[in-house]
Amino acid sequence: MNQMFKIIGSGKYVPKTIITNEDLEKMVETTNDWIISRTGIKERRKAVNETCSDLAYYASKEAIKNANIQPDEIDLIVVATITGDQKTPSVANMVQGKLGITTSVMSFDINAACTGFVYGLEIASRMLDGKRFKKALVIGSEKLTEITDYTDRNTCVLFGDGAGAVVIDYDDTVKPSYFYNGAKPDTNDTLLVKKYIEMEGKKVYVFAVDIIQKSIIEVLKQANLTLNDIDNIIPHQANERIIQSVAKSLNIPMNKFSMNIESYGNTSAASIPLLLAEYIASGHKNETILLVGFGGGFTYGAAILYI
Ligand code: UT7
């Protein structure tokens, strides 16, 4: 079933502090060359005196400003995160407070790991019908440096902090959007977080290449479109080689994929909205784009949107 909504504003926020590959060389046995050649990452950001809800708030403020609306026009806030400030209140609730929204709003967090934003967009868009809810703020925000073990070279080179947000508006006059979100159990604890992120990288890599291809094919099928109808693909930023491999298998030129992994590493649920906000900010409009992600759980998902 298709969804009728429009992204009317988007925003991003990354903390100022940068962790370079050279910084990591001093912490674990690794090299700048290894990290760049195996992942495509040059640097990532670290929130020092900011919480996950601070990052979410700054990205939201920009999205609301770009949407040219007042915060209290928002009546639904969904935050995708695995690194909330605390168990409760939710990050969404904290963002509501920071934005000064005192009118009746439904605000809650979801956890679908790195696919969280695509899940959140489907949830929010299905709740928008112009009667109960009108305008939703959908955010992906992560402070992954807090759950990263800086003695484990297998994981610590990958992750960073950041946030991205969009305001979506119910609109039955626009081209419809389509979703393909799903999950399958990770029965072998391939990727999990207790205190820190623990991951069997190779296995996640293989899963990712396969599921990204499937998700792209399935969402195109639902929309009755082909790759030629898609102007740009915004994939979860986990590893540049994963995207190169997908591009090769599906015969898609690499320049049809947006990438910013070089600057921010893997920001989990924030990676897709952060990249989407950058894509829109660089002047793209009246385009059909495809979002695609995968993550712990295992979760996966894709969306086709008209921006
Ligand atoms: O958001 C979703 C979550 N995560 C992902 O999507 C991650 C998916 N996986 C990956 O991106 C890749 O598997 C990694 C980047 C994590 C690892 O790259 P790889 O090419 O799959 O390397 P590998 O795990 O097969 O390790 C190859 C070698 C090993 O050494 P030996 O056993 O061959 O001697 C590792 O110990 O590289 C070693 N290694 C490192 N060497 C230098 C692992 N991490 C590092 C490091 N620096 N940081």
Image (spheres, rainbow, N blue to C red):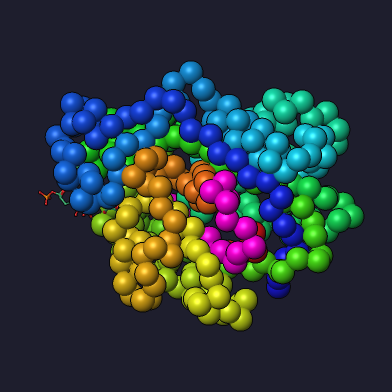
- Residue 211 point in image, percent of width and height: 42, 67
Q: Quadrant of the C terminus?
A: bottom right
Would you say residue 166 is visible in this rendering? yes
State the residue in front, 107 or 261. Answer: 261
Direction from residue 170 to residue 2 in the image, left or right: left
Q: Which quadrant is the N terminus positioned in? A: bottom right
- Residue displayed at 49% across by 76% down: 227
Tell me residue 27's x, y (percent): 21, 27
Where in the figure is residue 107, as x and y percent of width and height? 73, 39
Q: Is residue 151 visible?
A: no
Q: Residue at x 63, y 45 (%)?
A: 10
The stretch of residues the image draws in magenta is 280-300
Q: Quick check: is 286 in the magenta stretch?
A: yes
Q: Residue at x 47, y 28 (%)?
A: 15
- Of residue 291 and residue 203, the one placed in the foreground of this image is 291
Figure check: 247 above or below 49: below
Residue 229 x %, y %: 55, 75
Q: Residue at 63% across / 31% down in the picture?
A: 57
Image height of 230 relative to 294, above or below: below
